[in-house]
Image: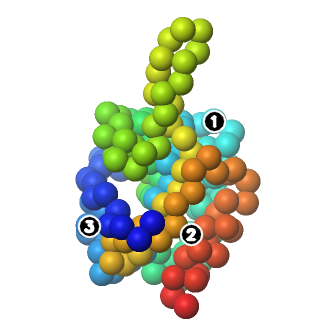
Amino acid sequence: MGQPAPNFSLPDADMQVVTLSAFKGKKNVVLFFYPRDGTPGCIMQAVDFSDHESEFLRHDCVILGVSRDDCLRHAEFRDEHGLSIGLLSDTEGEVCRSYGVLQEKETEGVRRESLVRSTFVIDKKGVLRHVAYNVNPRGHAAEVFNVVRRLKA
């Protein structure tokens, strides 16, 4: 924490490129990484953030979710669950690696990368102000909102 957040440019569910630096000086950013569209915990987390998006917006904060799913899968996920937050596609895992949210796991002798559910709060200056790994999706949006609220204080 306290260091500049790694910049990135990723496509969203509508294949529009979203760049972190575009928010500098304008918005705080909640950047949450989640394993996969459509899984119970990911649905709970994304719906919870969407349901409370207006409260975050009142605190000059945009919410962006990142997974390794592609843009089309994100669009289906968004539409199926009525999500309003931005969903970004990091199919190559480069941004996931730059934020340290990929871990190698070995299952039955096969090594593969898995994404650790993690959340980062980035202030208007582009500085990491809050970092949480292995988050529980239940009630997580409220916890993150408390962090965002304190940024203005």
Tell me the quarter of the image containing the C terminus.
Answer: bottom right
- Identify the residue at image location x=47%, y=21%: 112
Residue under label 3: 21
Residue depth check, mark 1 versus mark 3: number of the one nearer the observer: 3
Q: Are marks 2 and 1 in contact (CB under 8 Å)?
A: no
Q: Which SS class for mark 1?
A: loop
> Which residue lies under the disc numbered 1?
39
SS for dot 2: helix
Residue at (26% x, 69% y) in the render? 22
Task: Inspect this view and state whether residue 43 appears.
Answer: no
Q: Residues within 10 Å of mark 1 (few under 14, many from 20)?
A: few
Q: Which mark is residue 53?
A: 2
The residue type indicated by label 1 comes to Thr
Badges 3 and 2: C-beta atoms under 8 Å apart?
no
Distance between the alpha carbons at the discs numbered 2 and 1: 21 Å
The disc labelled 3 sits on which kind of residue? Ser
